[in-house]
Amino acid sequence: MDNKEEYAIEIENLTKQYKMYNRKKDRLLEIILPKYEHHDTFTAVDNMNLKVKKGEILGILGKNGAGKSTLLKMITGVVVPTEGNIKVNGKISSMLELGTAFNMELTGYENIYQHGQVMGLTNEEVKAKEKEIIEFADIGEHLYQPVKTYSSGMFARLAFACAINIEPELLIVDEVLSVGDMAFQEKSITKMKEIRESGTTIIFVSHSLQAINNFCTRAIWMQNGKIIMDGNTVDVAEKYKESMIDKPRQEQVEKKIKEKNKEENKEKEDIKDKSIKILKVESDKDEYNLYEDINIKVCVENKKKINKYGAGLIIYNSKSELVTAINTVRIEKYLNEKINEINFKIKRNCLNEDKYYVTVSICDEKIMFSYDKLEYATSFKINVPKNSFGVPLSEGIYACDYEITEK
């Protein structure tokens, strides 16, 4: 049986719906005639259940519109749920909308105390933190000027300093660690690490998978207002990444398949006239590790006994970017009429983690035209080793083979 005292947040059957009106007057009509609905309903958070233990660092992943911000606003009390219950055990400091407790007419110094009062602190408690907040914000004499005169950067620095230095029991962070210059970002992240080590419960929303892996102890993946995965950060981040990188290419593949289906009869007729026909394409594995050899076999039928031609592979990543193109003609190797099978070996592959799609082309000796070409003939995935934090050995398109020495 769960010990309720160990939870910082308990959420049961939480739903938030918004009324969506097509016209401004529809809202008025609904007020005048309450029996008639003139709106559509958008469900931002859909019957969610979630428990966060005290001291846990929960990362939240999800595309824009997944319901992340709405969830955080309900936890902080900014938004009222349509249905369900939220129980928060402890004092919350939120970085959703920095500076919401500030009065633009007051000076920065005066706003330090106002922010503290809004957070439930006494003036004595704020006084004890005053020096730390001022040094952290580091905005000089501007501290004694009205906040309305601040640049957006100065405003964010002071608001961040106030929010992060009040020793909250629950800290909510939504993609705000990018405020200020590089030095301030370094200071902010260092402070976040200190807070994490102190045992504060943190909810951390970020689009950075590396930040989630490095900083959090647990992660959830939200989609259409629901939690579709909850577990350790590496597993959740990996599945989320797969969903993001595969989609663009899958859409293209589906489009190509539809186009091919429309011309299916014509293609069947064309095949009869092909001088050289691709019979089969296959890779020896579906998944490879970084630096492992990749083997792709292409079987052909040379109907017209063409005696000088080439064969090549065009490899794309999941974003439809051309990664590499290799061809026998490029290395002045020509195929003859006796060839039935061409084996390509990509030695010690330096491809980064992604899913890759292979197009095969049989061409003339000058690569001017194709005797036959198969789009998306095969595909494979590359896995890259990760360190103890779940950070991959390399990122980008190309994974260079490197070594580091010390003196």
Image (cartoon, rainbow, N blue to C red):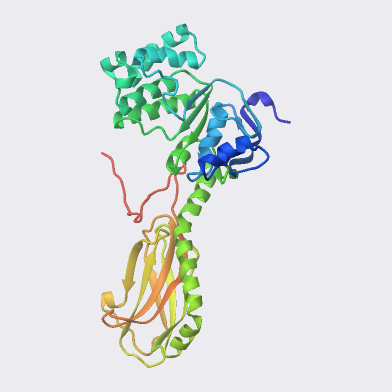
Q: Using the rendered image of the protein, determine whether residue 5 is visible from the camera's viewpoint.
A: yes
Q: Position of residue 236 (x, y in %)?
A: 54, 45
Q: Position of residue 275 (x, y in %)?
A: 38, 89
**Is 89 situated above or below 365?**
above
Q: Position of residue 119 (x, y in %)?
A: 50, 17
Seen from this angle, which residue lies furthest top?
Answer: 124
Quarter of the figure with the N terminus:
top right
In the picture provided, is 345 more to the left or to the right than 41?
A: left
Q: Quadrant of residue 343?
A: bottom left
Q: Using the rendered image of the protein, determine whether residue 232 is visible from the camera's viewpoint.
A: no
Quarter of the figure with the C terminus:
top left
**Is 276 situated above or below 91?**
below
Q: Quadrant of residue 191?
A: top left
User: Image point 53% across, 32% down: which residue?
Assistant: 72
In the picture provided, is 358 more to the left or to the right than 228?
A: left
Residue placed most toward the observer, 252 or 345: 252
Residue placed most toward the observer, 293 or 163: 163
User: Image point 33% across, 54% down: which residue?
Assistant: 401
Residue placed most toward the observer, 120 or 61: 120
User: Image point 26% across, 81% down: which residue?
Assistant: 366
In the picture provided, is 39 more to the left or to the right than 337?
A: right
Q: Quadrant of residue 58?
A: top right
